[in-house]
Image (spheres, grey):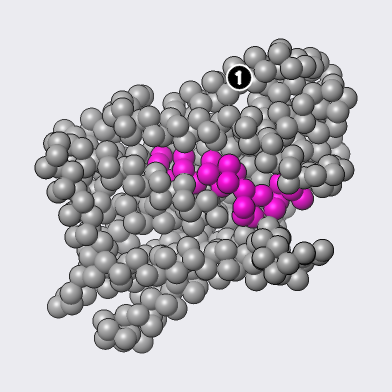
Amino acid sequence: MDNYGFLSILPPVIAIVLALRTKQVYIALLFGIWFSWVIINDFNFLTGTLAAIEGLVNVFKSPGNTRTIMFSALVGALLLFIQYSKGVEGFINQINKVILYFEKKQSGYSRVVVQLMAMLTGILLFVETSISSLTVGTLYRPVFDKLKIPREKLAYIADSSSAPSSILIPFNAWGAFIMGLLLTQGIDNPFGTMISSMAYNFYPILAILIGFGVIIGKKDIGPMAKAEKRTRETGKLLNDTAKPMLSSEVTSFEPKAGIQAKAYNMIVPLATMVFMMPINLAYTGWDAVEGATSFGDHIFKAIGEGSGSSSVLYSVLTAILVAMVLYRSQKIMKTKEMIDLTLKGISELMPLALLMLLAFAIGDACNELGTGQFVANWSKEWLSPAFLPAIIFIISSFIAFSTGTSWGTFAIMMAIAIPMAEIHSAPLALVVAATLGGGIFGDHCSPISDTSIISSMASASDHIDHINTQLPYAMIGGLLTLLLYVILGLMLI
């Protein structure tokens, strides 16, 4: 069977519903993967089961997937290092001074300031979503815990400031990927088209504005309001039934006794990881550059051509090595302690690495089923030109929600949206923006999204609780975006 039709959307949708209803993400994803391969093998349960096992193995055939899974595990070592060295404690001591300053001005104001600092940090680290989410969660989790701000709020801030800023400030691997897709569709000026589309890319803009509004206005809704009430009244940072993505072994690891708490023991390794990201992007993309007019132009183009998965892996490895040298020079750790901590950190984050494996595997299965292509082709028969941007946004959102990948959505939808824009004489920038915004919106709502998974992990939040608390804010942004696209479609097409 080559064309699976409606069957192609069943496995990811069932997996998402199961994850949200049961909170058993691993089982839900495994079922989705298994059911996908059973469909592909004409409902032969034996060959389908064997194919599902091979599908999990084949995830590692992709170097990008393997690097991302390795990055997810190695992060555990870095987190244990900064905990054991009292770097976290030193950072908290410095933030406490800021908290005291603002608390003297107005009671409760420090909670707002710290959340704003977290949001701004996520936006400034637009170079890579994984680095952004990881840094925000790691840096601010102990401070949020001290101020009794629920972990769900930190995960929301980390998630809502990472991908939206990366796509709105596209001088990174995201920008390179989008320009590459535009080039394959015969767009003569891909950079100009991408930049002009930013003015119409409403969802990422709204996601950031809503984030700031929630923080400054101190007005939470839905499950997030319940989480805030729980933390305020009971001091509990998580629900009683929550299963945080990061174990207490990592978040509450006992620091070494008898050493001074210094903030730079935390800041230097994390800053190294962030600083190395653009350098590694330039390095991995250097040889792919053609027609550079100057050294600066070559660097800029090399960053655009660089490998995001290679760069995050190299960055976290460099950060671990810098941490080792830093702590060894202060006689905080011996070599054996470092090796033991590295292995322990990796073991503690194996559940995250497994979740990433399952997320990639169901994405591969959806590609095999042609999930995205089916949804996109289905719209061609009945689409009205005036509603083209709105429909493109909805379809992109659904594909991203079902597959858990915004990049995969861009790859599927650009090949369909751009020709449709030309056929219907629609503004190209508007249609491109709807495609990109839909990918981000669907990704924000999906429990199988890799960026949402990393946000939950870095914040030590229950993943399904993170999705549930983020969903109302994402839906508000998504509905407002849809309304804007309907209005612009009626005005311009």
Q: Where is 253 relative to 102, above or below? A: below
Extreme residue toward the top, this view: 490
Q: Where is 310 relative to 176, above or below? A: below
The percent position of residue 468, horizontal first and vertical second, equals 42, 32
Residue located beneath label 1 in the image: 484
Q: Is residue 155 visible?
A: no
Q: Is residue 178 magenta?
A: yes
Query: Which one is nearer the viewer's eye here, 70 or 413?
Result: 413
**SS category of the residue bearing label 1:** helix
Tell me the quarter of the picture where residue 312 sits.
bottom right
Extreme residue toward the left, this view: 104
The percent position of residue 324, horizontal first and vertical second, equals 38, 80
- Tell me the quadrant of the picture where the C terminus can be found: top right
Could you tell me what secondary structure mostly forms the magenta stretch?
helix
Q: Residue at x 14, y 48 (%)?
A: 100
How crowded pointer 1 is (Cα within 10 Å; few <14, some 14-19, many 20+) is rated as some
Left or right, 421 with respect to 23, comes to right
The percent position of residue 10, horizontal first and vertical second, equals 67, 32
Which kind of residue does numbered mark 1 sit on? Leu
Q: Where is 433 relative to 302, above or below? A: above
Q: Residue at x 23, y 30 (%)?
A: 229
Q: Where is 295 relative to 111, above or below? A: below
The percent position of residue 340, horizontal first and vertical second, equals 36, 79
- Tell me the quadrant of the picture where the N terminus can be found: top right
Query: Which one is nearer the viewer's eye here, 289 or 262?
Result: 289
Query: Which one is nearer the viewer's eye here, 93 or 189?
Result: 189
Tell me the quarter of the picture where residue 283 sits.
bottom right
Left or right, 326 with respect to 374, comes to left
- The segment highlighted magenta reads 156-180
